[in-house]
């Protein structure tokens, strides 16, 4: 299972973790960490959040994508429906379309989620780290309470609209600097004019005064916690009646 093989290396609070694969019988099932609030889009639809909370969600999701880029992963399907939310953290999930490597050329006959595609992907079916520009679309979803992007438009109309240089307008008032970042710096027609996800994260951190996490240190803490939990479980099993 390609998805499980990709997920086994992830050790980031903002990317959903793999616990294992149930492969004894069909269908194969992936066992992932529990995100108590479920899918991000559903959580946004059901809960009233203020702009500060939404800005935090944008920063966290950017960190998750940035982390994937450091692991040489193109997600290819960044959207609120493909993120989970739990313990106050957005976690990037659903890696069914993800690929390893800096670029990926897709078969033009494959069906894809048009509303979240970069312009060049619509044109020539090419993906790279900067085509995960769909982060900007997801940020729009976050600020619009999980609303589907390009409301009232068919996929064909969305493609025509985007390929003629148009972008979605914000229907809500937000920090103008964050709005500029989402609309201009992640949605530029020329991918060379777009910020990298790392640059987007740093910019968001500056605008929200939220410090950058130490991915390596956080991963080490999680490994130590997992090892301690495993030792405790083993000790408990060894001391249970009838275990001798």
Image (spheres, grey):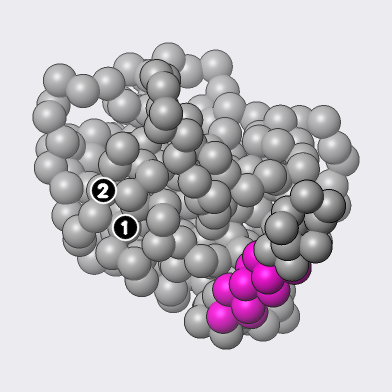
Callout 2–callout 1 Cβ contact below 8 Å: yes
Quarter occupied by the N terminus: top left
Q: Which residue is mark 2?
A: 99
Q: Which residue is mark 1?
A: 73
Q: Secondary structure at mark 1?
A: strand
Circle 1 crowding by C-alpha within 10 Å: few under 14, some 14–19, many from 20: many
Q: How many marks?
A: 2
Q: Which stretch did the figure color magenta?
A: 220-232
Image height check: is 179 above or below 219? above
Closer to the chain start, of discs 2 and 1, is 1
Circle 2 crowding by C-alpha within 10 Å: few under 14, some 14–19, many from 20: some
Residue 127 picture location, percent across and down: 22, 47
Magenta segment, principal secondary structure? Answer: helix
C-alpha gap between disc 2 and disc 1: 6 Å
In magenta stretch: residue 142: no
Residue 211 picture location, percent across and down: 67, 82
**Which residue is rendered at x = 28% and y = 64% of the image?**
72
Q: Is residue 56 left or right of residue 6?
A: right
Residue 157 visible in the current orientation: yes
Looking at the image, which is closer to me, 150 or 21? Answer: 21
**Which residue is rendered at x = 33% and y = 49% of the image?**
5
Residue 99 picture location, percent across and down: 26, 48
């Amino acid at each position: 299972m390609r998805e499980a093989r990709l997920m086994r290396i992830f050790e980031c609070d903002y990317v959903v973790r793999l616990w294992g694969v149930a492969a004894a019988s069909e269908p194969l099932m992936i066992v992932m960490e529990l995100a108590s609030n479920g899918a991000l889009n559903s959580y946004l639809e059901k809960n009233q959040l203020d702009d500060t909370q939404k800005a935090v969600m944008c920063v966290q999701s950017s960190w998750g994508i940035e982390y994937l880029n450091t692991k040489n992963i193109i997600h290819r399907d960044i959207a609120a429906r493909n993120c989970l939310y739990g313990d106050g953290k957005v976690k990037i999930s659903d890696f069914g379309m993800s690929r390893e490597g800096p670029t990926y050329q897709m078969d033009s006959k494959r069906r894809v989620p048009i509303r979240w595609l970069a312009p060049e992907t619509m044109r020539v079916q090419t993906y790279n780290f900067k085509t995960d520009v769909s982060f900007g679309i997801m940020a729009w979803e976050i600020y619009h309470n999980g609303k589907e992007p390009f409301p009232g438009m068919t996929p064909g109309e969305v493609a025509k609209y985007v390929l003629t240089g148009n972008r979605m307008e914000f229907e809500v008032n937000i920090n103008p600097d964050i709005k500029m970042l989402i609309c201009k710096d992640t949605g530029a027609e020329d991918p060379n004019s777009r910020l990298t996800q790392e640059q987007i994260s740093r910019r968001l951190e500056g605008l929200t005064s939220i410090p950058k996490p130490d991915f390596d240190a956080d991963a080490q803490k999680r490994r130590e916690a997992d090892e301690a939990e495993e030792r405790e479980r083993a000790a408990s099993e060894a001391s249970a009646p009838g275990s001798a």
